[in-house]
Image (spheres, rainbow, N blue to C red):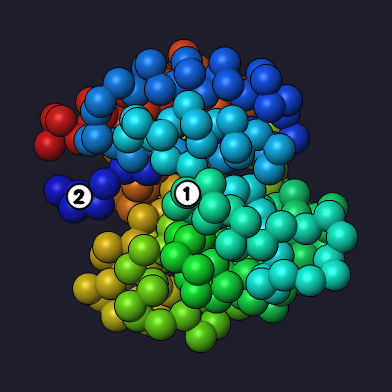
Amino acid sequence: MEKHRKYIIAGNWKMNKTAGESVELAEGVVKEVGDQTVVEAVLCPPFTSLDSVATVVEDSPVKLGGQNMHPAASGAYTGEVSAEMLRFFYASYVILGHSERREYFKESDAFINEKVLAAFANNLKPILCVGESLEERESGSTLQVVETQTRGGLANVTNEDAESLVVAYEPVWAIGTGKTATPEMAQEVHAAIRGILTDLFGSEIAQKIRIQYGGSMKGSNAKELLSQTDIDGGLIGGASLDAKSFAEIINAARELEEAE
Ligand code: PGA
């Protein structure tokens, strides 16, 4: 089946790389990506590296994203950053509701929803992360968990904003563990997410929304995952910390796109 959505491969560097180290990695990615725009490449470095990475990607097609943000515009929230602060560095995207934020920082669907709405209000495209734990998968509640997170995170999002939304399905048990969901397992959940998006925003918009897979995606498994009907990209942790490994995933998406 032909896909009409542009692949989006985003690197989630998590709490890795100083500003200095980030320059080197970003330069490597910019070099690997070159001037190709068939696949959208996004880098999400730590906040402390946004400035330096912004300078490196400035004249390239590589886009910038934050890993989190606070929903308030400004104020007494020690340690937090706002959407406007991310926009200052021309960030286009922001990862919201990553499972590590949900687990270690106790972020709720309601709080994540506030962030999603604040991101849209500031012209940032949210990458909303959803996904089940191993326990939830084993108890058969995967689809229910993903539905609650998707609907909760997207409450009150308008149809107009929804077009630029990205959803990342990241089974928690596959993150950083080397265990990847099989393409069929991932596709099943991606299709269910697309169904929820259709219910929320109608079919035309749901068909435009990109759904990334995340969880130990790498060069060697990217192609079979990305070839699934409803998998439109990847949110990459470990393999994004090396320019060549990250580029292997971008190239896999590119080959699929060009083969269509
Ligand atoms: P991983 O991380 O690729 O290291 O599994 C993905 C993520 O957490 O976004």
Residue at the location (74% across, 35% down)? 15
Residue at the location (47% across, 80% down)? 157
Write down the residue under mark 1. 90
Query: Is 176 positioned to the left or the right of 211 in the image?
Result: right
Res. 61 mark: none
Query: Is 1 positioned to the left or the right of 250 in the image?
Result: left
Residue 230 seen in the figure = yes
Dot 1 beta carbon under 8 Å from ligand 1: no
- Percent position (x, y) of residue 77? 83, 66
Count of labels in the image: 2
Mark 1, residues whose alpha carbon is within 10 Å: few (<14), some, or many (≥20)? some
Specify the amino acid type for callout 2. Answer: Lys
Q: Quadrant of the C terminus?
A: top left
Query: Is 135 positioned to the left or the right of 157 in the image?
Result: right
Report the front residue among 124 and 254.
124
Mark 2, residues whose alpha carbon is within 10 Å: few (<14), some, or many (≥20)? some
Res. 3 mark: 2
- Percent position (x, y) of residue 213? 48, 45
User: Mark 1 falls on what kind of element?
Assistant: loop
User: Mark 2 falls on what kind of element?
Assistant: loop
Residue at the location (25% across, 52% down)? 5
Residue at the location (53% across, 46% down)? 89
* Mark 2 or mark 1, earlier in chain: 2
Mark 2 to mark 1 CA distance (whole Å): 29 Å
Specify the amino acid type for callout 1. Answer: Tyr
- Percent position (x, y) of residue 181? 54, 40
Q: Is the residue under label 1 in contact with that under label 2 (CB below 8 Å)?
A: no
